[in-house]
Image: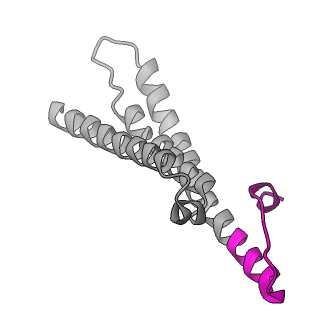
Amino acid sequence: SAGMLSFGYLALSFSWLMALVFLVWIYVNRDDPVVRLAQIQYLVLICVGGIISTSSIMGVTQQAGHDESTDAADAGCAVVPILYALGWTIQYGSLCAKTLRLRRVVEKSSGAMRTKITVWQTSH
């Protein structure tokens, strides 16, 4: 129905808007010690994962009329689980990598020396 489509597009727009607002906020405050401690790379990945995940709403909204080709609707249905799973994996994968990075910092800091663990080191 038209009301459900409108609600879907409204939810999608709000989600994308909030993710973009947070990305801009992260960029503007990137030199703040609290934001740097929150690990900017992972914050960006969480926002991007949210955008990709909520993009699955676009696939659900593809419809075909009675005499129209169903190719667009079929493609929309096929892409929904892919987008949702990809976005979810990016979001929660970045949270897991962030947690692993913090764990490694804590383990290395037992000698009371300053330790730097890069994003590259958490991906291997």
Query: How is the structure coloured here?
Result: one colour
Magenta region: 100-124
Q: Name above or below for residue 47 compared with residue 8.
A: below
Q: Position of residue 97 (x, y in %)?
A: 68, 63
- Name the side, left or right, on which 47 lies relative to 111: left
Q: Quadrant of the N terminus?
A: top left
Q: Quadrant of the C terminus?
A: bottom right
Kindly identify the residue that appears in the image at 24 percent across and 38 percent down: 10
Residue 29 in sight here: yes
- Name the side, left or right, on which 66 lies relative to 28: left
What secondary structure do most residues of the magenta stretch adopt?
helix
Magenta stretch holds residue 122: yes
Q: Name above or below for residue 80 compared with residue 65.
A: below
Q: Where is residue 46 in the image (x, y as percent from the top left)?
A: 53, 53
Q: Where is residue 40 in the image (x, y as percent from the top left)?
A: 59, 55
- Nearer-the-camera pick, 3 or 66: 3
Quarter of the figure with residue 33: bottom right
Quarter of the figure with residue 4: top left
Kindly identify the residue that appears in the image at 31 percent across and 37 percent down: 13
Magenta stretch holds residue 123: yes
- Nearer-the-camera pick, 88 or 59: 88
Q: Where is residue 63 in the image (x, y as percent from the top left)?
A: 33, 25
- Name the side, left or right, on which 23 lies relative to 106: left
- Nearer-the-camera pick, 110 or 69: 110
- Name the side, left or right, on which 113 lies relative to 43: right
